[in-house]
Amino acid sequence: MLEDLTEEYRQADSWLQVESLYSLSRLWLNKGDKQRAERYMREVEELFAKYKESAEFDPAAEAAFLAHRQVLEYAQKGSYHCFPLVQYNNHWSEADYVRYRVAEAKERSIRDLRERNLYLTISRQRQMIVIIMLFFVTLGGILLFVYLYRRRQWLLLEKEEEIETLRGIINDVRRDDVRCTKEVDVRKLMLQQLGVIKTIAGTPTEANQQLLARLMALNEETANALIDWPSIYQTIDLVYDGFYTRLRDKYKDVLNEKEIQLCCLLKADFSTKEINMLTRQSLQTIYQRKTQVRQKLNLAEAEDITKILG
């Protein structure tokens, strides 16, 4: 039956004929017919080369064929050569080793590639952090520059306004025919107490710079120390019919010293800006003290503080 199947496989030109011929060689060897076993085995070896590269080829069959050839040789000659089988095993061992090395190299390459990708990712992240930091540092520098520039412009504008205010006070002192004599006396005394007239005297071309430098060096405490308030109070009393003495006697328990000074300057017709220039009090402080005086004296917001004593 197997020989009939082999003929069918021959006509179909299939790999199965190699397997059936191999089976016939084994069967005839088991029956003791070594010649038929040898004949079928030779056919197997001839067809094996033909089908080795085909898609039907089974690599495991090659080892079986080689082993059967060794058994057949031993049955015929009483000895066999193991070299073909050993060579075959070595071949597959080397192939396995090569596959192992290739797989290992591939895995190592993948691992190295991942490490490089990770390193590149970290490097890009660091670069991005550096760029962001530089951006914020640059932005901060720009904002700081803009702030300092605007602050400088504001300070220059403020000092220009102070110079104009002070120049107006000085002009009022010099123009006795324009201002009331009483007011001029008080203003002149205030300027003399601060040393401003002496500061602006000399070379007119440098007067504004000297004046600005002098004023910038003052604060409320130092400016207040330069003013001889007893002399100011005495002048206020002489010029305005005892305004300071009446204010002190009537409101000494209500108003503090700073508030009394403010009332005297307001009575002498000093503006808020001029008081800021002469006493170096901030505008906000002056406005707050005005509000406190009105609250303590129960005056309306629009009511004149200097009218309280006539």
Image (tube, rainbow, N blue to C red):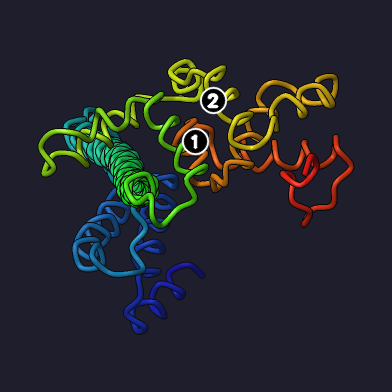
Q: Which residue type does callout 1 highlight? A: Val
Q: Quadrant of residue 212?
A: top left
Task: Establish if 7 lies above or below 105.
Answer: below
**195 vs 140, nearest the viewer:** 195
Q: Quadrant of residue 88?
A: top left
Total labels drawn: 2
Q: Which residue type does callout 2 highlight? A: Ile
Q: Is residue 166 left or right of residue 52?
A: right
Q: What residue is disc 1 on?
A: 186
**160 vs 206, nearest the viewer:** 206
- Residue at position x 33%, y 44% in the image: 148
**95 vs 55, nearest the viewer:** 95
The residue at the far right in this view is 298
Q: Are marks 2 and 1 in contact (CB under 8 Å)?
A: yes
Task: Establish if 37 lies above or below 225.
Answer: below
- Residue at position x 79%, y 54% in the image: 303
Q: What residue is disc 2 on?
A: 232
- Where residue 261 appears, as percent x and y from the top left, is 63, 28
| Label 2: which secondary element | helix
Q: Can residue 121 be seen by looking at this rendering?
A: no
Dot 2, how many residues are within 10 Å of its Cα: few (below 14), some (14-19), or many (20+)?
many
Q: How far, Cα to Cα, is label 2 from label 1? A: 7 Å
Task: Establish if 286 lies above or below 23.
Answer: above
